[in-house]
Each structure stands twice: as structure tokens, then as C-alpha cells.
Image: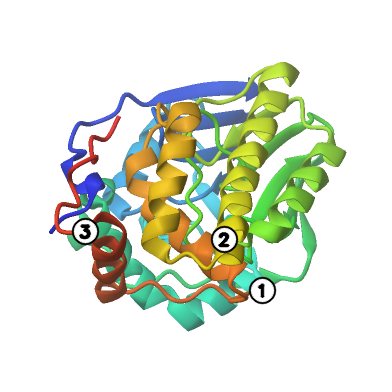
Amino acid sequence: MSFASTQDLADKHVSFDELGPGLYAYTAEGDPNSGVIVGPDGVVVVDAQATPIMAADVQARIATVTPLPVKQVVLSHYHAVRVLGASGYPAHSIICSDATRDLIVERGAQDRDSEIGRFPRLFRGRESIPGLTWPTQSFHRKMSLWLGEREARIIHIGRSHTSGDTVVWMPKEKVLFAGDTVEFGATPYCGDAHFADWPATIAAIRELGPEKLVPGRGAALLTKADVAQALHETESFTSDLFGLAKQAVAKGWNLTQLYAEAMGVMRPKYGHWVIFEHCMPFNVSRAFDEASGITHPRIWTAERDLEMWRAVEGASPMKSAEVH
């Protein structure tokens, strides 16, 4: 038995787009993104990538625009694919929300093992990972990094993709590094989500008024229209799925029934997004849990992954597992 994502082996084309003076987006056709902020004395990276070897590619792109070293890494949340590459940077400071640090304590090791098993291509050079990534600094609600006269405002924006979700907001430039609170042309992963809170988190992002945005996955958004589209689509996807889950629980359905219904309803609208087939079993499972009253997401382990996959996909989990 294997996950849809284990068949996704093709390397992705990396883009390194300028969002404004000293502001860049490292994107890779739906693979996890990183943000780059060049200050007068050093560089800030938002989300570290999954392994030190993969972090080296981010630094190679940075080297094309500045000789300055990476001094700070900001973690948008705790997922292994975002954080385990942190040791590959010369940064003296690794920053995350206090809620994210709590999640690393509670479930960081299990999440690491689970994610590597699900999506091995995203952990190229995983033998280079020395262990869990621990912050050197955590914050409550928000903090500011001052890069000369430029402010990078780090905000624990609200619960959505995880309970620790953090964005980096450049108020003067109106550029937002959004982490996985927002996706674009990529399926939101909701296995550790707080569906009921996600709309309020999107509303908080809208209130900031970003004119350019780096989503967690998908192309950098360089116009207000694209930003608005990404916010709308992320909100629609998560709200549609949670609505189906609440209906299923009200009807007394089980997880397998909800999964069949959700795939039938959501594939026509969202099935062309990257990692749709991979994410949906985890998304449906979490939506079912939350609709059933389990407010704190259960910890994913490699064993639970397979148990869930069997429940929703039956004996042939690859029957609809083409990864786009």
C-alpha cells in the first residue's frame, strides 16, 4: 500500500521572482515555497525547505542577488517539509510562534516520520537532516524584525492550516509571505487544520491589504487580482469541504462515506490543483474529526497514515492516485 504522492517523482522547475527591492519568492510548481528578504546586513528566509541539501538551492538563488548570508529563518508553521532544512543555513536565529514551538514539542518527531513516508521526493538528501528543527526565539502574537529602516512584521495570524500559522508582512511594500494559510493552484493540506477558524484567518489577511503575496504552494502572486483570487479559492476549498463534513456527521455517515461524497463533489471543481489526490484523504479525515467535535487535531504517525488510507481508499489506494 502506498500513497499517491510516492508516485510523484518528477523534479519541478524552480522560479525566483522579485516582488520588490530585496524581496523574492522561491517557488517550484506547487512544491513548498520559501520567501527571501534582503536586509542591509543579512538575509531573512521564510520557510527553510525540507532538508539542508534543498536549503542549499535556496541559498544558490540568493547568491545571484546578494553576497550577504542568511542570518534569520522564520518558520510559518511546524511541518517537516518547511522546517527540517533550517540547519543548512548559517542563520543565528530561527523564529516561530510560541504555538508552533508547542507543536514541535508535541508532535514534531511523529510529523517528520509521517511526512517523509508520504512524500519522499520532497525530502531529497534527507540523510543530511541532523534532527528536529528547534527555534532559538519564539514570540506571542507578533514581533518585528528591523532590517535597517525596513520592517518585517511577523504575525501569528490565526489558526487555519495549523494552530501556529505565521505570516511575514512587509507593511511598507504591502508584500505578504503567507505560508500555507493561502495556496494558489495547489490543494490546501488540511490534515492538521482548524476549519472553523480558517475563514477568520483569511479575513485577517485581507485586512492587511497585501498587493503581492507568496503562498505556501503555487506561483508568486504579483497583482492584487491574483491575491484576491488565491484568498477566495483557499477559503472556498476549505469551507466547501468542512460543509460536507458537517452534513456527513449530521447524517451519521462514516469516514469512508464522507470521502466518497467529498471526492465526487470536489474533484470537478478542484481536482486539477496539484497534490489533490494526495491531500484529500488527510483533509477529509481531519474535517470529519473536527465536525465530530475533535477540536485539537490528532497526531499523524506513519501507522495512522496507513490506517486512514485503508479506510478511505479500500484495498486499492492507487485507484485514483494520479498526481498532477
Q: How is the image coloured?
A: rainbow
- Rendered image quadrant of residue 194: bottom right
Count of numbered circles in the view? 3
Give the residue pinned by disc 2: 193
- Determine contact: label 1, label 3, CB under 8 Å: no
Q: Earlier in the sequence, mark 1 or mark 2?
A: 1
Q: In this view, does 186 lie to the left or right of 12?
A: right
- Determine contact: label 3, label 2, CB under 8 Å: no
Q: Quadrant of the N terminus?
A: bottom left
239 or 245: nearer the viewer: 245
Q: How far apart are marks 1 and 3 (CA)?
A: 39 Å
Q: Which of marks 1 and 3 is nearer the N terminus?
A: 1
Give the residue pinned by disc 3: 314
In this rendering, the label closer to the viewer, 3 or 2: 3
Give the residue pinned by disc 1: 98
Q: In which quarter of the image is the C terminus?
A: top left
Q: In the image, what residue type sits under mark 2? A: Ala
Q: In the image, what residue type sits under mark 3? A: Gly
Q: Residues within 10 Å of mark 2 (few under 14, many from 20)?
A: many
| Label 1 element class | helix
- Rendered image quadrant of residue 213: top right
Q: In this view, does 188 lie above or below 60?
A: below
Q: In the image, what residue type sits under mark 1? A: Asp
| Label 3 element class | loop
In this rendering, the label closer to the viewer, 1 or 3: 3
Q: Which residue is drawn at 25% across and 75% down?
A: 303
